[in-house]
Image (cartoon, rainbow, N blue to C red):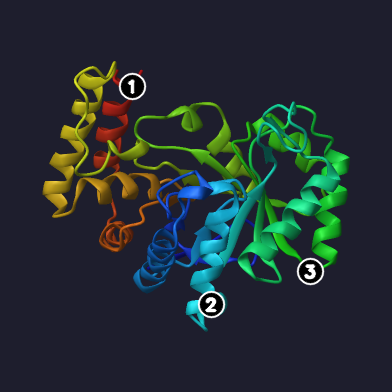
Amino acid sequence: MKTVTLGTSSLVVSRLSYGNMRCVGTWNPSEATAERRRTGAQAHLAALEAGYTLFDTADIYCRGVCEEVLGEALRRSASMRRQIVIATKCGIRFAGDPAPDSPHRFDFSSDYIVQSCEASLRRMGIETIDLYQLHRPDVLMNPSEVAGAFEQLQRAGKVRFFGVSNFQPSTLAALQSHLSIPLIVNQVEIHLGRLACFEDGTLDQCVERNIAALAWRPLGGGWLGEGTDLPLGDAQYAQKRWVQSVLDAIAADLGASRTQVALAWLMKHPAPIVPIVGSARPEHIHRAAAADALDLTREQWYRLYVAARNKPLP
């Protein structure tokens, strides 16, 4: 698989990332059986075999189980840690943490960032996180406090580089203004059913500041790939079917699949955009990797963009 450098960092990664949010098939830790964990670990090894070198997770995925499963995969493969870049996230707290009446919220306090990082390191069984991201914007974020936590973690050798997730350009700029180290990624939802990042300045900022855009949910939750039937009651049924038909026509021209074209469409952007592939099925992981070999023409890219906009360009 071809590679890309994440922002201004020294991290060189595959053009597609493997995301493990679905690796155990549940968000309920009590349902994460030993068999589901084994299957999840095998999915990570399949991704490594397929050429993925950026592995994305988060502390909240199945309340830490997904980080543990990544750790299990590392234990199964003696060389895996040297071959991959590990990215995880922090900052989301569930209701009931730490007190029964605590609300669901976001927390970028220095103490919480540091303790979250240390917990993630323990769950994965590693000494250093390559890329540590703030998961969702905390309205009470104090950029100076975040900077202190980042500097502490970097000095201790616990984190190499930092990024954010789901940040608007103004929020990212406010945080960056207080940091002595550059943010290297913004992980956001981008796909043919969600074009906001093309229009709200997010991708413009990525190009301007040399920040990589990691695209979560790049297949729109499945409808941009194969094997997903749209419910007739979907409010956007006609529009989604139109986008699927354009994807299928271009896929036929290229001898590719709908999934591969949808991912290649994202990778055409110069930001660069790194789609996060979230399947737990080895065959799907391998098939998605072939998107790296596709290079859409500008005409093909714009056919899809106009179809996704559902209106002509001005």
Which numbered disc covers residue 313? 1
Residue neighbourhood size for the residue with mark 1, other residues' Cα within 10 Å, grouped as few (<14), some (14–19), many (≥20): few
Q: x, y percentage for residue 33?
A: 44, 57
Closer to the N terminus: mark 2 or mark 1?
2
Residue neighbourhood size for the residue with mark 2, other residues' Cα within 10 Å, grouped as few (<14), some (14–19), many (≥20): some
Residue found at x 35% / y 30%: 193
Residue furthest out toward the bottom: 78
- Tell me which amino acid carries mark 2: Arg
Picture quadrant of residue 225: top left
**Label 1: which secondary element:** loop
**Is residue 246 or residue 110 the one in the foreground?**
110
Which numbered disc covers residue 157? 3
| Up/down of 15 relative to 272, above or below | below
Closer to the N terminus: mark 1 or mark 3?
3
Looking at the image, is mark 2 or mark 3 nearer the viewer? 2
Looking at the image, is mark 1 or mark 3 nearer the viewer? 3
| Up/down of 248 relative to 280, above or below | above
Which numbered disc covers residue 75? 2
Residue 180 seen: no
